[in-house]
């Protein structure tokens, strides 16, 4: 009888053991901090229209800032240009050249899964008045070695 009780206790003890470690659910939202959003209105757009990229080191960042400020001083429109690339990376989306002002491009979401990071953007065209318009949205996110894909 003792053996049956001990066996029953052992069975009960081990039957309630489970791995309660929470499993990561994919995809996960990635937190971001906005560095800049607006539209360039320069008559000479430089070489950046249509750019969608992830910047992961200081050389890339400085090259981008130089191009972004081509023929005007757009860097002053950014809320921060000092990035710690050991901890962060920058996501840049710049729309194509539009012939009317009042347009926008927005990073709607950034989601991470096991293989990559997906950036979903939305473009809104309003066409207020005839003028060169190049909408942009720039954010920073935690650094990752995963490839960044854009919709």
Image (cartoon, helix red, strand yellow):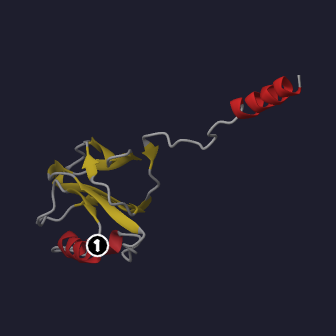
Q: Quadrant of the N terminus?
A: top right
Residue 1 higher or lower than 48, as above or below: above
Q: Is residue 102 visible?
A: no
Alpha-carbon neighbours of circle 1 within 10 Å: few (<14), some, or many (≥20)?
some
Please give the name of the residue rendered at 34% of the width and 69% of the height, measured from the top-left corner.
77
Q: Nearer the viewer, residue 129 or 31?
A: 31
* 60 lies left or right of 24: left
Residue 29: x and y, percent? 46, 46
Residue 2: x and y, percent? 88, 27
Please give the name of the residue rendered at 16% of the width and 73% of the height, measured from the top-left corner.
70
- Disc 1 is placed on an element classified as loop
Residue 50 higher or lower than 12, as above or below: below
* 88 lies left or right of 128: right
Residue wearing tag 1: 57
* 50 lies left or right of 18: left
Q: Nearer the viewer, residue 146 or 21?
A: 21
Q: Nearer the viewer, residue 39 or 9?
A: 9
Residue 91 higher or lower than 65, as above or below: above
Q: Quadrant of the C terminus?
A: top left
Residue 83: x and y, percent? 38, 74
Q: Is residue 68 visible?
A: yes
In terms of image quadrants, where is residue 47?
Answer: bottom left
* 55 lies left or right of 108: left
Residue 34: x and y, percent? 42, 60
In terms of image quadrants, where is residue 67?
Answer: bottom left
Q: How many marks?
A: 1
């Amino acid at each position: 009888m003792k053996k049956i009780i001990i066996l029953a206790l052992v069975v009960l003890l081990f039957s309630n053991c489970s791995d309660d470690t929470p499993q990561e659910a994919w995809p996960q939202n990635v937190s971001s901090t906005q560095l800049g959003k607006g539209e360039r209105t320069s008559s000479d757009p430089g070489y950046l229209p249509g750019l969608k990229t992830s910047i992961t080191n200081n050389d890339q960042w400085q090259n981008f800032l130089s191009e972004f400020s081509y023929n005007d001083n757009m860097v002053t429109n950014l809320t921060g240009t000092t990035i710690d690339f050991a901890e962060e990376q920058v996501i840049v989306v710049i729309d194509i050249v539009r012939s009317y002002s009042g347009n926008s491009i927005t990073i709607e979401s950034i989601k991470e899964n096991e293989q990559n990071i997906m950036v979903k953007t939305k473009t809104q065209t309003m066409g207020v008045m005839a003028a060169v318009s190049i909408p942009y949205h720039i954010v920073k996110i935690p650094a990752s070695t995963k490839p960044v894909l854009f919709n």
